[in-house]
Amino acid sequence: MSPTVAVLDYGSGNLHSATRALAAAGAQVLLTADASACLDADGLVVPGVGAFAACMEGLAAVDGPRIIRERLAAGRPVLGICVGHQVMFDRGVEHGVEASGVGVLPGTVERLHAERLPHMGWNVVDAADGSALFAGAESERFYFVHSYGVRADADVAWPEDARVTWVEHGGDRVVAAIELGALSATQFHPEKSGSAGARLLRNWIATLS
């Protein structure tokens, strides 16, 4: 039987493309804001586009931070995508507005230093050693579109068991993905990354039980 995946519906865009991609990768997918459904599913996906603070407001409106923290505390898998990745960090600073994140990852999401923004297009990533997400796709290209992220020069104290994948853009070295316990998160859009993104989603779905 295929694992169940809840896609958290909190008003952010790009929900349906993520839902279709997860279904194509082999999951039974439910698009929902219901807390019980999100807690009970084998996996939870938190997508997101737009501004950090606005996404956090939307998450708070459906009790998203509590749902995410409860799942992770119980060792239940969560996948964040794009701004859904960014909100997992301690805080975000965008257009002079500072907002608290879910806080399950250390670090601050801030504007990149690269001259050309947004960072838009296809990039090879520097996949973390032992990554489950990137198994078989370590040298593939993934689709990015963002102007904010967690930079390598921000001197974050990563947990010892964190697997951090990086991407280079315009002289900035930025977190492209992270795996920590039951949490996986990608700055890029796997649902827009063709066969490489489909492989990554299949890898994540294979970890669900």
Image (cartoon, rainbow, N blue to C red):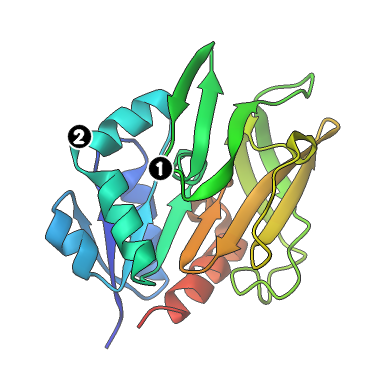
Count the marks. 2
Residue 146 percent coordinates (x, y) = 59, 32
Left or right position of 140 against 42 = right
Residue at 59% over, 69% down? 133
Query: Residue placed farthest to the bottom in the image?
Result: 1
Q: Quadrant of residue 125?
A: bottom right
**Visible residue check, residue 160:** yes
Of mark 1 and mark 2, the one earlier in the sequence is 2
Rendering quarter of residue 154: top right
Quick check: 151 left or right of 148? right
Measuring 69% from the left and 48% from the top, which residue is drawn there?
157
| Residue 54 at x, y percent in the picture | 35, 25
Q: Which mark is residue 61?
A: 2
Q: Is residue 1 left or right of residue 126?
A: left
The correct choice, above or below, for 204 with respect to 45 in the image is below
Secondary element type, mark 2: helix
Q: Outermost residue toward the top? A: 96
Q: Nearer the viewer, residue 74 or 81?
A: 74
Question: Residue placed at 62% from the left, 41% from the top?
Answer: 144
Tell me the distance, in whole angstroms, between the alpha carbons under discs 1 and 2.
13 Å
* Position of residue 110 in the picture relative to residue 153 (left or right): left
Residue corresponding to mark 1: 102
Q: Residue 31, position in %: x, y?
A: 22, 54
Quarter of the C terminus within the rendering = bottom left
- Amino acid under label 2? Ala
Query: Would residue 11 be visible to someone looking at this image?
Result: no
